[in-house]
């Protein structure tokens, strides 16, 4: 019988917190059990294995990011909305490095929930580009371009891979502005 108050959601939230504290690769059923002061087999009332928990952390992260991005885009439109979404993405990914790492391995879980989690987030950028009189084909390319830029840049920041003394935030700002300038060249094409 499952412990009262212990739900799949509480386990995922705890795993997400642990991912941010120690990294997604260091999470274990044993550590989660210790956190809840229960025996490890109790987790099998909610999940079949650790990968299922990590998949839950990935979905949790994409949902949180989607909500943050949508809030950032409220009240702005067009290029300003794209910029706001980029900054919301950067903020979330760099302040939740462990969750973000889990989000990057979503392709290990090719199911409808994983597909929908990422689709929802980037569909917002697609809809914005389509509203700017950018062709459907170019809008799809732009979504791929922004996704690869945002995920790659944030991953490099989180892994402390930039050794240049220039502020990373300045590089991010220049990159976003450059990408948006490129978007503008695709209007009516």
Image (cartoon, helix red, strand yellow):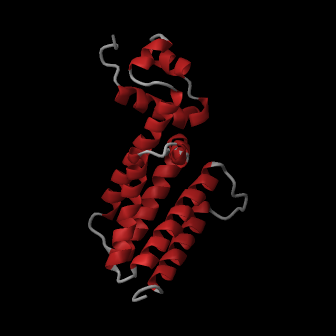
Numbered label tally: 0
Q: Residue furthest bottom?
A: 188
**Looking at the image, which is closer to me, 31 or 136?**
136
Residue sitting at the far front: 111
Q: Position of residue 82 (x, y in %)?
A: 40, 69
Q: Nearer the viewer, residue 116 or 170?
A: 116
Residue at 37% x, 47% y is 63
Q: Position of residue 40 (x, y in %)?
A: 49, 14
Q: Residue at x 35, y 64 (%)?
A: 124
The image shows residue 146 at horizontal and vertical percentages of: 50, 67
Q: Position of residue 37 (x, y in %)?
A: 45, 12
Q: Residue at x 54, y 77 (%)?
A: 178
Look at the picture and state if 97 lies above or below 150: above
Residue found farthest to the right: 163
Where is residue 10, by image quadrant? top left
Q: Is residue 60 left or right of residue 50?
A: left
Query: From what the image shows, is residue 124 above or below residue 138?
Result: above
Residue 81 seen:
no
Examine the rendering and report whether any part of residue 18 can be seen: yes
In front here: 182 or 21?
Answer: 182
At 50% from the left and 51% from the top, the residue drawn is 93
Quarter of the image that includes the C terminus: bottom left
Decide if residue 141 is on the left or right side of residue 60. right
> Extreme left residue here?
75
Compared with 102, 32 (above or below) is above
From what the image shows, is residue 81 above or below residue 59?
A: below
């Amino acid at each position: 019988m499952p412990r009262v108050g212990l739900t799949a959601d509480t386990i995922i939230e705890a795993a997400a917190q642990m991912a941010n504290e120690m990294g997604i690769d260091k999470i274990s059923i044993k550590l989660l059990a210790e956190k809840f002061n229960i025996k490890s087999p109790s987790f099998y009332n909610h999940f079949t294995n650790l990968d299922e928990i990590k998949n839950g952390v990935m979905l949790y992260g994409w949902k949180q990011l989607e909500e943050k991005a949508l809030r950032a885009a409220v009240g702005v439109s067009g290029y300003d909305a794209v910029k706001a979404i980029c900054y919301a993405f950067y903020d979330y990914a760099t302040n939740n490095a462990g969750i973000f790492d889990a989000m990057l391995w979503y392709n290990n879980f090719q199911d409808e929930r994983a597909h929908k989690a990422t689709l929802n987030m980037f569909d917002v950028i697609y809809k914005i580009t389509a509203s700017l009189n950018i062709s459907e084909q170019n809008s799809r390319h732009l979504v791929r371009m922004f996704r690869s830029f945002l995920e790659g840049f944030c991953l490099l920041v989180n892994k402390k891979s930039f050794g240049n003394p220039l502020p990373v935030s300045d590089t991010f700002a220049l990159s976003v502005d450059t990408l948006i300038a490129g978007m503008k060249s695709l209007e009516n094409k």
